[in-house]
Image (cartoon, rainbow, N blue to C red):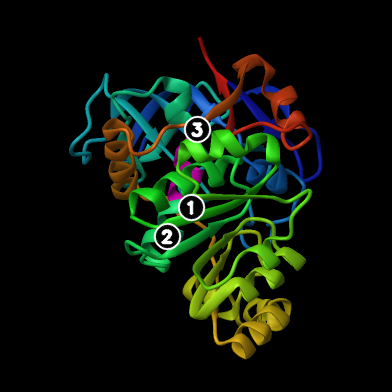
Amino acid sequence: MHAFVIDSYKSPLHAADVPEPTVGEHDLLVEVGAAGLNQLDEKIRLGEFTQLLPYRTPLTLGHDVAGTVVRVGPAVHGFAPGDVVFARPRDHRIGTFAERIAVHEDDVALAPRTASMAESASLPLVALTAWQALVEIADVRPGQKVLVHAGAGGVGTVAIQLAKHLGAHVATTASGTDAVFLRELGADVVVDYRTEDFAAELSVYDVVLDSLGGENLLRSLGVLRRGGTAIGIAGPPTTRFAKEAGLNPVLRVVMGVLSRSVRARARRLGVEYRFLFMRADGRQLREVAALVDSGAIRPVVGRTYPFDETVAALAELGKTSTRGKTVVTRA
């Protein structure tokens, strides 16, 4: 089948013919209708996650999929050929930049009935990130104050809507040109990062979701109330994360060193820092699909490319300002 692969880390993404997927007893064989693009794809291509995700090459990239079930393994329950599904395949089983992919049933959910194939493909990774940050880790409650950085991005557009659905007062940082759009999504406060200082404008927040890292994360700790939580998805990873992920003792030490300054600042301020590396979860995707169908979450697809232009699409990712997600489609 046709796919887009890398032959080694830092080598270019290119089209190739690869073997058909092997379908295990708990797997669904999915005909890919659309695949979302993520910065994670490019970071893996560049070899930035080899310690966390030691993939063997050649490797088919792609972490988001929406498509139609072709066949199911003998132990699969709840899915049948013809079902339209969406998924973020688990780590070490990625490869949605292909004509077909085998996905474990636990990673899959029926796609939202009210969403297009491209809209469904835009959701899995970013929606799971938002859900695991705001529902699992932060346990956001009505009346709490949540700051979502980079609100016009893939994670941000979903996180704003989810936080608002949970009853929070939502602030976000973005370009001023996106202010009206983000208020339509549910943001109560939009801070223009080009002309305003969020750390001076905001205070006593319960939760910060940071996708930028570095100095932005350190300064975000200062807008939290005592006992508040900052959740970082751009790093640095922590010793707690390393333990929960079952990483070896050497990596635990390394991650402790990498996160020492942010953890120390958090302790001084009486707040908590948590690192999140999202995981596949079909049950949570079912919750997301229900929110889409109820109108609580609107998928935001900023740009689409034909499947044959996947190389160009990934190359453009991050180079131009795009609201929400970029998606490749197989018409």
Q: State the residue at coordinates (48%, 61%).
A: 146
Observer-nearest of 158 and 243: 158
Segment tinted magenta in the rendering: 122-128
Name the residue beneath numbered marker 1: 129
Name the residue beneath numbered marker 3: 122
Q: Is residue 306 left or right of residue 300?
A: right
Viewer-nearest of discs 2 and 1: 2
Q: Residues within 10 Å of mark 2 (few under 14, many from 20)?
A: many
Name the element at disc 2: helix
The spot of residue 85 in percent (x, y) is: 34, 29
The reply to whether residue 253 is visible in this rendering is: no
**Is residue 123 shown in magenta?**
yes
The amino acid sitting under disc 2 is Leu
Which quadrant holds residue 14? top right
**In 3D space, how far apart are the residues under numbered discs 1 and 3 (Cα atoms)?**
13 Å
**In 3D space, how far apart are the residues under numbered discs 2 and 3 (Cα atoms)?**
19 Å
The amino acid sitting under disc 1 is Thr
Name the element at disc 1: helix
| Disc with the residue nearer the chain's start (2 vs 3) | 3
The spot of residue 314 in percent (x, y) is: 71, 31
Name the residue beneath numbered marker 2: 134
